[in-house]
Image (cartoon, rainbow, N blue to C red):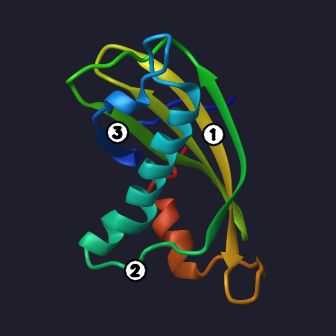
Amino acid sequence: MDTEAPSAQFRHVYEFHIRFGDIDSQGHVNNVKFLGYLEDARLEMLHSDPVRKGERPVRGMVVVRHEIDYRRPLLFTVDPVRVETWVTEVRTASFKLAYEIRDDEHVYATATSTMAAFDVEKGRLRRFTEAEQEALARYLPRE
């Protein structure tokens, strides 16, 4: 999984608190909850943050693939944890995201998602608009 983290200027940061219900019988965050954290981070990055800034959100995306590597157990804590997200590739109708679920000391998981642009009304894949490509490019590190 190619998740080499870029500088902070290309990362979207989403902070959250672990809920007691996220903890499984083994005393750590259940693996399926990690996908929920990634979803929340994506929604903030592509929808909520742009809306708060008065910008048009990126809409009509579907997940094509997720891949996740669990690095260490994530235990309940009162301190916030964060998902740092960036774009690793943009194509005409899809893009790839990389993530780190982490705090200041540890990376608990790394993940990637492939997302595709989707026309909800027509029920089929579509191409990105120029505005959507520009919105995604702000999180795409330049070499």
Going from N to C along the chain, the mark reached first, 2 or 3, is 3
Q: Residue furthest bottom?
A: 121
Residue type at mark 2 is: Arg
Above or below, 58 relative to 19:
below
Secondary structure type for disc 3:
helix
Give the residue at x 67% y 63%.
62
Q: Where is residue 25 in the image (x, y as percent from the top left)?
A: 49, 15
How packed mark 1 is, by other alpha carbons closer than 10 Å (few <14, some 14-19, many 20 or more), is many
CB contact under 8 Å: marks 2 and 3? no
Above or below, 141 relative to 57:
above
Going from N to C along the chain, the mark reached first, 1 or 2, is 2
Q: Which residue lies furthest to the right in this view?
A: 124
Q: Is residue 141 shown to the viewer in this render?
A: no
In the image: residue 10, left or right of residue 143: left
Above or below, 16 relative to 24:
below
Quadrant of the frame with the C terminus: top right
Task: Look at mark 2 in the image and give the residue it sits on.
Answer: 56
The span from disc 2 to disc 3 (Cα, nearest Å) is 23 Å
